Image: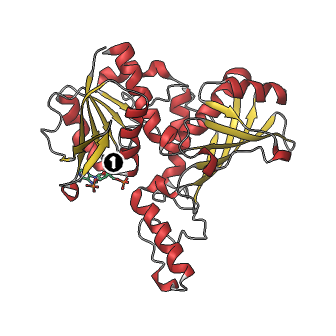
Amino acid sequence: MKEYNVAVVGATGAVGEEMILTLEQRNFPVKNLRPLASERSIGKTVKFKGEEIPVEVLDKDSFKGVDIALFSAGGSISGKFAPIAAESGAIVVDNTSYFRMEKDVPLVVPEVNPDDIAMYKNRGIVANPNCSTIQMVVALKPILDHYGIKRIVVSTYQATSGAGRKAMEELVEQTRAWFEFKFDECKPVKIPKVIAFNCVPHIDVFFDNGYTKEEMKMINETRKIFHKPDLPVTATCVRVPVFRGHSESVNVETEKPFDLDEVRRMLDEAPGCKVIDDPKNLGYPTPIEASGKDETFIGRIRRDESVENGLNLWVVSDNLRKGAALNAVQIAEILIRDYL
Ligand code: A2P
């Protein structure tokens, strides 16, 4: 079997680390792994297949001989180095929002729009969508195909790991300070307000229309992935004191009528989805139960009785995994299977 040189940019971060683990767990045919990070990581190593591999400092020569480069070190790093990587002959799978909405860059969730990957040829870049978008479109794709979608209203409950390793540490530190009654030590750094024992409806920056960038990402990316540029979507994104796993309350109006049992069956059979919907016996997904798993879990499936053809879903997935690392590695798997 052919093997590939793979670079991971942001290898020491929450997503980068998960990317390396996912490559190993899925037995991706890696010839050489090149973990890249900043000067802060000089002397660090990452573990891959039982080996300690030294982290290298990212620079413009980092991509010589690299076939696939997975990026998750922030938008500005992708903006600068993804074109350099592509120029060197690597195919970039970029987990940041930097290229997602560019017309000639495909934005791909393998269970939803795998054929769009072919567009990687334009610029050598495939964009990995926002974590909250990914799990929502995985859950809604079967609904879209069977019944059509008229409108989506989503509210999210997003884990701190979505804001990186430092944000997870912030939750730990603030929780510790809280229990020691040292409230003045509960200082927000990565998350705009105190996150311990709190909910913060502010992810990424605010726009003039009153939405956050995270909310607009969910709206615009969903339209692009579904190839429905005018689909009515509205979102409210909230950071909650959870380490790992995003949850979403998704309300959909379908075009055609549906049968709830059929919806359950269809969702359970859909690629990447698993239905857990037996509420009387605690059968509904939660972030702790979804942590470390690949699937998008769906529960609380019920009719929205306030509108015609209204459906409510509770959608939970591991944001570091399907929301980031796994989706990127699945894209890389399709690239090597169909294009390289
Ligand atoms: P480093 O650990 O050396 O700072 P997270 O999203 O969990 O905060 O992780 C961000 C990742 O992006 C880390 O691996 C971090 O490396 C990397 N990173 C941040 N800034 C740079 C930079 N200027 N050059 C290369 N990697 C960077």
Residue 331, given in percent of the width and then of the height, sits at 42, 27
Residue 140, given in percent of the width and then of the height, sits at 65, 32
In the displayed structure, 121 sits above or below 196; it is above
Position of 77 with respect to 241 (left or right) is left
The residue positioned 61% from the left and 51% from the top of the image is: 288
Viewport quadrant of the C terminus: top left
User: Which of the two residues, 208 or 144, is positioned nearer the viewer here?
Assistant: 144
Residue 269 lies in what quarter of the image? top right
User: Which of the two residues, 99 or 82, is positioned nearer the viewer here?
Assistant: 82
The residue positioned 49% from the left and 68% from the top of the image is: 172
Residue 182, given in percent of the width and then of the height, sits at 50, 85
Position of 252 with respect to 191 (left or right) is right
User: Which of the two residues, 97 or 264, is positioned nearer the viewer here?
Assistant: 264
User: Which of the two residues, 123 or 283, is positioned nearer the viewer here?
Assistant: 283
Amino acid on which the number 1 mark rests in the picture? Gly
Does residue 148 appear anywhere in the picture? no
Position of 86 with respect to 302 (left or right) is left
Q: Which residue is mark 1?
A: 75
Determine whether the beta carbon of the residue marked 1 sits less than 8 angstroms from the nearest atom of ligand 1: no
Residue 210 lies in what quarter of the image? bottom right
